[in-house]
Image (spheres, rainbow, N blue to C red):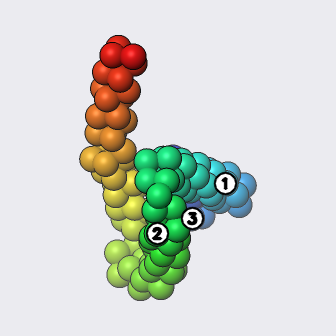
Amino acid sequence: MACGLLTYGFTLNYGKHWIGLAFGWGMVVAGMIASTVSITAYNLEKYPDQSTVVSAIINAWRTASGFSVGYFQPAWIARNGISAVFGTQVAVVVAVLILTITPVIIIEGRKTKAQVAHA
């Protein structure tokens, strides 16, 4: 997803061929689909008794974030420029990956290894 945002942002900023926009946006969409599916699957497996609440929370966040980007981004681009906006979005995506998803994988991996060792 980060590579797609960079490709899209730099292609748009430097006025390059439209194929860069298409490939960049394709990478962004593929990353969004993969992350949404994996987050939903993880949470539904982790909290099967609260599946309705989990689905509602995930869809509310997904809808709110999709709305907020389209709502706030045009003024942000006008104020700071395309490269700064997409660079900041890449930094946020990478920071979220490092600070949230990576620790979950490490902690859950240790728990799974401990459960398998005791079984």
Residue closer to the observer: 68 or 24? 68
Q: Quick check: 47 above or below 60?
A: above
Q: Residue at x 46, y 69 (%)?
A: 53
Would residue 45 be found to the left or right of residue 21 on screen? left
Q: Nearer the viewer, mark 1 or mark 2?
A: 2
Residue on which disc 2 sits: 53
Q: Position of residue 74 (x, y in %)?
A: 47, 82
Q: Amino acid under label 3?
A: Leu
Q: Amino acid under label 2?
A: Val
Q: The residue tagged with tag 1: helix, strand or loop? A: helix
Residue 10 shows up from this direction: no
Question: Which mark sits nearer the N-terminus, 3 or 2?
Answer: 3
Residue on which disc 3 sits: 12
Residue 42 shows up from this direction: yes
Q: Nearer the viewer, mark 3 or mark 2?
A: 2
Residue closer to the observer: 77 or 95? 95
Would residue 48 be found to the left or right of residue 119 on screen? right
Would residue 73 be found to the left or right of residue 107 on screen? right
Residue 113 figure quarter = top left
Residue on which disc 1 sits: 26
Q: Quick check: 8 above or below 66?
A: above
Q: Residues within 10 Å of mark 3 (few under 14, many from 20)?
A: some
Q: Quick check: 60 above or below 99?
A: below
Q: The residue tagged with tag 2: helix, strand or loop? A: helix
Look at the image and tell me in which quarter the C terminus lies: top left
Q: Position of residue 35 (x, y in %)?
A: 52, 51
Q: Residues within 10 Å of mark 1 (few under 14, many from 20)?
A: some
Q: Nearer the viewer, mark 1 or mark 3?
A: 1
Question: Which mark sits nearer the N-terminus, 1 or 3?
Answer: 3
Question: Which mark sits nearer the N-terminus, 1 or 2?
Answer: 1
